Structure formats: structure tokens, C-alpha cells
């Protein structure tokens, strides 16, 4: 008994003299969900904890992109920001211009650095501001053409995806039908839903851009953009071979009465499971050029924490964006792995072998473009472009496309001038 007391006293003295080092704690916010990567991400975080037992990682699902950004802005303003946070492609600009993001350039070049040249330059554009990197691509995506091969063949077409706008139109002409004779098309070749990133795809494919390189002026009403928007409007109202779908989703596609739809590669895994027909998957069609906007999200380092916490956060960011982990995320969801070396990771190589449709999004990686990075995009320009704005004029009202795009320029550039004034630019 005396011996045990002596041992206990000695142990207590040693603990007081040599206290156990506290773990470095970091907090990570993401917007993944159960069907789009959350289980995979949680597993990767668990592996990190095993590899770095001296780092405590709290992973929090902060909700969807809109809700999480609002929470993030409040948290940063209140001094309670996470160390790492995910944002959607068009939602990081406000954080950057408010000083909420931390450059990772020194970490990349440091002793625990990475080969940044292994990442797709186009994907890195979304996490770059004024020449500096503030995060890394993670759950990135591009739109793809999903098409019903059975409906193609039933319409006398070969089951091959369209590669040009002319093919989209010509295929749609052969597919579209009025099956009940009421004068209205009820089998469609193509659909257009509330404009967002696909507006950028169609205008970009016609050689147009919606913002200048200096990010000082919107350019919606160029001749290239007007021509592109007139083409798609005519497919609906003049040719009557396409439909405007609003936000109704895939209903007609799964019902077998819509042949082609442009949707995210993030839906690839679920779409493959859902299809009851022979579903093809292909890169977007091209016109004057090929152009695919980048969607999905990225992880950013937040400008918070001690030096030790920032170094721990960098180790976590480096871990989750390793070639192997990005490949695993791609296989689990359909999101793109933004590193070239991920193409040789066992998981992705096996996925390509078993399911070649996973390759489609990578076939347009070199023509994938960063979306506009202005802090008012989703508050001002997005709504003016989408349902209730230009989309309603173009499709529901069959209105004047040129006038609609000129109005978009007016709205967007008024906000641009106000924002530039705050930057003294």
C-alpha cells in the first residue's frame, strides 16, 4: 500500500513538472452532404487524426453554400472563424476583399510544401486573387451533357453525343415530337433551366465573355452573347425542339421524354445509379470555341489562429488534397480531381476502367474557366440573370434578347461602379 502511494505521488510530481503537451486544435467547415462526399470526407479526416495525433480536428457541416457563407461572414466578423472553410466558386470574393482569407503561398514553398504545378491551372484560378493563392480546389465540377441513347436510336440517330451547336439543333429536330397531336411538343431534344453557370457556358462557347479581364466591367450585351442567347431562345420558341425547365429538375429526362440535358459532373455517380435507360455522358458541345465553367467548391485557409494552428490547418489542407484523396473523392461523387497525378491513383484508374463515363469531365479540363469573382455576384447579378430576370424574359416571355442583355449590363455595371469605388479603383 505504501509503495502504491509513493508511486502515485511520484507520478503526480512528474506530471506537474512535465505537463502533457496540449493538442493543437483546428476547425474545418464544409458544405458536403450524405450523397455528395460527406462520408468520404469524414473518413479522410479520421485518417488525418491517426497520422497526426497531436492535432485535434473538429469537422463541421456548415450547411449549403448560401447558408455556410452567411455563417462564415458572421463568424469571421465576431472573431470565431474556422481555420479552413469551403466556399462555392462565386462566393469567395467577399471573404478575400474583407481580409478574411490567408495566403498559402509560404506554406506551398515551405518544408511541408506541395508541387503546385501538379494542380490544374484553370482550377487554381478560382482560388487565386491578385497573384496569390488562398486555398486549393477540392470538390470542383464542370457541366456535362447527359443523354438518352435509347431515345436517340428510337429517333433514327446514332447514340453519339452532339459535339457542336449545329448537332444539338439537328439532333433535337429529329427527336422532338408532338405525340398526342395537341399542337404542343411533348418529347424534347434539349432543355434549358434557370440560367447560372450554363449561361457562361453558352456565351463562352460562342466566343463571348461576361466580364472583362480586369474585373472592372460586365460585358453581357456583346454581339457574341446576343447571338448565343438568340440561338437558344429560338430552339425553344421558333424551332420548338427544346424546353425551358425552370427548376423542375430531371423529371422529363428520367421519364424518357427529354433526350439531352446539361448537368453537373457532381451528379454523375447518382445519375448512373438512377438511369433506367442507356445513358450517355459527354463533354459540352462547342461552337466558335469550347468552354466549360468551373463549378463546385474549394477549401480556403482563413485568416485566423496562432502560427501553430495555421501550420496545422495547412497540414490538413495538404492531406485532403493529396492525389490519392482527391481521386477517392472523385470516385465517390463524380467531382473532379484537380491534380494531374490523381489520374494515376489506383482508385481513379480502376474507376475509369469499370466506368468510362467518369472520364467525360476530364476531357474538357483544359477548356474549363473560372467564374466571375466579385462579391456581389450572387446578390445582384445572379438574380438578375436567373428566374425572374433575364431567364424569364428570354423563355417565359419570348422577349427581346438584346434589350434583356443590355439591362443586365446596366444592373451589373451600376453595382460594379459602387464596388470599385469602395476599393478606390
Image: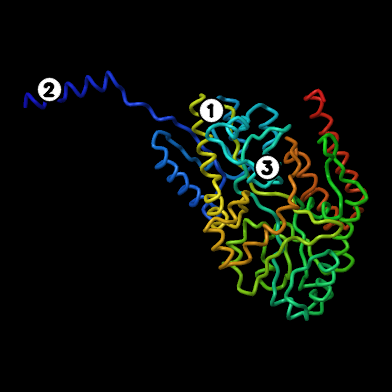
In the picture of the structure, the residue carrying the numbered disc 2 is 6
Q: Element under label 2?
A: helix
Question: Residue 80: which numbered mark, if any?
Answer: 1
Q: Residues within 10 Å of mark 3 (few under 14, many from 20)?
A: some
Sequence-wise, the earlier of marks 1 and 3 is 1
Q: CA distance from mark 1 to mark 2?
A: 45 Å
| Residue 118 falls left or right of residue 205 | left
Q: Position of residue 414 (x, y in %)?
A: 85, 34
Mark 1: few, some, or many residues within 10 Å (few <14, many ≥20)? Answer: few
Element under disc 3: helix
Q: Residues within 10 Å of mark 2 (few under 14, many from 20)?
A: few
The percent position of residue 347, horizontal first and vertical second, equals 52, 58
Residue for point 11% across, 27% down: 4
Q: Is residue 38 left or right of residue 224?
A: left
Q: Give residue 110's position: percent from left, percent from top.
A: 56, 31
| Residue sitting nearer the eye, 368 or 386 | 368
In the depicted view, which residue is nearer to us: 13 or 110?
Answer: 110
| Front residue of 324 and 305 | 324
Q: Which of these two is toward me, 378 or 224?
A: 224
Residue occupying image coordinates x 57% and y 55%: 330
Q: In the figure, 198 relative to 317: above or below? A: below
Q: Which mark is residue 355?
A: none
Q: Quadrant of the N terminus?
A: top left
For disc 3, the marked residue is 124
Amino acid at each position: 500500500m505504501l509503495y502504491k502511494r509513493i508511486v502515485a505521488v511520484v507520478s503526480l510530481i512528474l506530471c506537474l513538472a512535465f505537463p502533457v503537451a496540449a493538442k493543437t486544435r483546428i476547425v474545418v467547415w464544409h458544405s458536403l452532404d450524405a450523397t455528395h462526399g460527406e462520408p468520404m470526407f469524414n473518413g479522410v479526416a479520421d485518417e488525418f487524426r491517426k497520422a497526426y495525433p497531436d492535432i485535434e480536428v473538429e469537422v463541421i457541416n456548415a450547411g449549403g453554400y448560401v447558408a455556410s457563407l452567411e455563417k462564415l461572414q458572421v463568424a469571421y466578423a465576431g472573431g470565431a472563424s474556422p481555420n479552413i472553410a469551403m466556399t462555392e466558386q462565386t462566393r469567395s470574393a467577399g471573404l478575400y476583399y474583407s481580409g478574411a482569407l490567408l495566403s498559402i503561398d509560404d506554406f506551398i514553398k515551405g518544408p511541408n510544401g506541395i508541387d503546385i504545378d501538379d494542380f490544374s491551372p484553370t482550377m487554381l484560378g478560382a482560388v487565386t486573387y491578385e497573384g496569390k493563392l488562398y486555398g486549393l480546389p477540392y470538390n470542383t465540377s464542370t457541366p456535362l451533357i447527359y443523354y438518352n441513347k435509347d431515345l436517340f436510336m428510337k429517333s433514327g440517330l446514332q447514340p453519339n453525343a452532339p459535339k457542336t451547336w449545329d448537332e444539338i439543333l439537328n439532333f433535337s429536330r429529329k427527336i422532338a415530337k408532338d405525340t398526342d397531336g395537341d399542337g404542343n411538343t411533348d418529347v424534347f431534344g434539349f432543355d434549358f433551366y434557370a440560367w447560372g453557370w450554363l449561361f457562361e457556358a453558352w456565351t463562352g462557347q460562342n466566343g463571348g465573355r461576361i466580364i472583362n479581364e480586369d474585373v472592372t466591367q460586365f460585358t453581357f450585351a456583346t454581339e457574341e452573347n446576343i447571338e448565343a442567347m438568340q440561338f437558344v431562345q429560338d430552339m425553344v420558341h421558333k424551332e420548338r425542339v427544346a424546353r425551358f425547365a425552370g427548376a423542375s429538375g430531371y423529371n422529363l429526362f428520367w421519364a424518357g421524354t427529354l433526350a439531352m440535358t446539361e448537368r453537373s459532373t457532381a451528379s454523375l455517380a447518382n445519375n448512373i445509379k438512377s438511369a433506367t435507360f442507356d445513358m450517355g455522358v459527354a463533354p459540352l458541345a462547342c461552337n466558335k470555341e469550347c468552354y466549360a465553367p468551373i463549378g463546385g467548391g474549394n477549401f480556403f485557409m482563413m485568416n485566423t489562429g496562432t502560427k501553430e494552428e495555421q501550420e496545422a490547418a495547412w497540414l490538413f489542407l495538404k492531406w485532403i488534397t493529396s492525389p490519392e484523396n482527391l481521386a477517392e473523392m472523385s470516385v465517390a461523387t463524380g467531382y473532379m480531381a484537380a491534380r494531374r497525378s490523381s489520374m494515376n491513383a489506383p482508385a481513379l484508374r480502376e474507376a475509369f476502367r469499370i466506368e468510362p463515363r467518369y472520364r467525360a469531365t476530364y476531357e474538357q479540363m483544359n477548356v474549363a474557366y473560372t467564374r466571375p469573382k466579385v462579391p456581389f455576384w450572387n446578390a445582384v447579378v445572379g438574380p438578375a440573370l436567373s428566374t425572374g430576370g433575364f431567364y424569364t424574359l428570354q423563355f417565359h416571355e419570348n422577349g427581346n434578347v438584346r434589350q434583356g442583355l443590355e439591362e443586365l449590363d446596366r444592373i451589373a455595371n451600376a453595382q460594379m461602379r459602387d464596388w470599385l469605388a469602395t476599393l478606390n479603383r
